[in-house]
């Protein structure tokens, strides 16, 4: 009754492979969730490349992608995810914002069209399946794993996820914009009582007015939402590419002062969420 969470990419908008982004990481959004022998991957940003190599070494051959949306920083690792080139691998991809736009398969295949990528989608060897749903839907993945979703306020749409398993719960709420003074009711309902919420904290409250309408939120809003919803811990996520390690160190200090249950997600960080009967329900390690 343990949910294992690992951050393979925590950056937003564009990868930042520079020396002053090493501490928190420069790869874009990708989070691995392990429940027993089930593998769930939240987004296919550039961090998914290293995850793919790790899954191959571990001999994992079946997994599911849950896509928040399909802007480049959340999908451009997919063509470099080595398991898609293996015939013995089964991969399912789900998304909740594309039903009226041709579906998730169309979007993922289009980014691999010439002249922008040399390997056509049709040459992928894995057993791939695709499913589109509507943000707000709920569904079971079997084995006691349940997923609830909610629409995110982001250009071109997006989906937030809640994964529940035998008394443990994780929410992935990225690429969404808040309205100052008006907490998002869809998000509050989705994250209510969750153990861990991974939240879009691209900006600070001070920066936000300059980027209003760009579809992102702040770590302070994440704290406000999580405190209001009785959340266990908040992972500050989707760091702006201009926020180097020194800046993020400052965010980490300020966030701990504002709410001790908030922390800044770092590439390579692992979190274990255990059932309520455990005295230390959430543990973290790098």
Image (cartoon, helix red, strand yellow):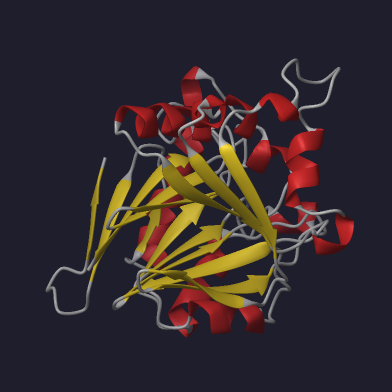
Using the image, determine if residue 116 lies above or below residue 194: above
Q: What residue sits 70% from the left and 67% below the top?
A: 133
Q: How many marks?
A: 0
Q: Look at the image and tell me whether residue 183 can be seen.
A: no
Residue 138 at x, y percent in the picture: 58, 77
Q: What residue sits 56% from the left and 25% below the top?
A: 85
Q: Which of 251 and 5 is in front in this view?
A: 5
User: In the visual, does 182 lie left or right of 125?
Assistant: right
Q: Look at the image and tell me whether residue 84 can be seen.
A: yes
Residue 175 at x, y percent in the picture: 66, 56
Q: Which residue is farthest left?
A: 279
Residue 215 picture quarter: bottom right
What is the quadrant of the N terminus in the image?
bottom left
Q: What residue sits 48% from the left and 84% below the top?
A: 228
Q: What residue sits 79% from the left and 43% below the top?
A: 107
Residue 187 at x, y percent in the picture: 60, 76
User: In the visual, does 274 lie left or right of 79?
Assistant: left
Using the image, determine if residue 73 lies above or below residue 191: above
Residue 235 picture quarter: bottom left
Q: Which of 128 and 118 is in front in this view?
A: 128
What is the quadrant of the C terminus in the image?
top left
Using the image, determine if residue 115 lies above or below residue 246: above
Residue 237 at x, y percent in the picture: 51, 51
Q: Which of 259 and 66 is in front in this view?
A: 66
């Amino acid at each position: 009754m343990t949910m294992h969470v690992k951050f393979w990419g925590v950056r937003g908008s564009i990868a930042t492979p520079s020396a002053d982004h090493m501490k928190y990481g420069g790869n874009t959004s990708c989070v691995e969730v392990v429940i027993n022998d089930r593998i769930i991957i939240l987004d296919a940003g550039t961090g998914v490349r290293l995850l793919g190599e790790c899954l191959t070494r571990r001999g994992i051959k079946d997994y599911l992608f849950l896509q928040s949306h399909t802007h480049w920083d959340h999908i451009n690792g997919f063509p470099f995810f080595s398991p898609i080139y293996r015939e013995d691998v089964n991969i399912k991809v789900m998304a909740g914002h594309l039903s009226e736009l041709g579906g998730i398969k169309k979007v993922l295949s289009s980014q691999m069209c010439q002249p922008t990528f040399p390997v056509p989608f049709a040459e992928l060897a894995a057993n791939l399946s695709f499913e589109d749903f509507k943000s707000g839907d709920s569904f079971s993945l079997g084995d006691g794993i349940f997923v609830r979703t909610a629409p995110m306020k982001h250009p071109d749409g997006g989906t937030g996820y809640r994964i529940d398993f035998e008394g443990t719960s994780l929410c992935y709420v990225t690429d969404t914009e808040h309205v100052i003074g008006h907490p998002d009711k869809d998000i509050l309902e989705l994250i209510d009582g969750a153990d861990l919420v991974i939240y879009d904290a691209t900006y600070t409250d001070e920066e936000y007015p300059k980027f209003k309408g760009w579809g992102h939120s702040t770590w302070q809003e994440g704290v406000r939402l999580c405190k209001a919803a009785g959340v266990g811990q908040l992972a500050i996520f989707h760091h702006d590419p201009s926020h180097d390690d020194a800046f993020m160190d400052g965010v980490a200090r300020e966030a701990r002062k504002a709410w001790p249950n908030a922390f800044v997600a770092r590439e390579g960080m692992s979190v274990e969420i255990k059932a309520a009967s455990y005295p230390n329900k959430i543990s973290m390690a790098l």
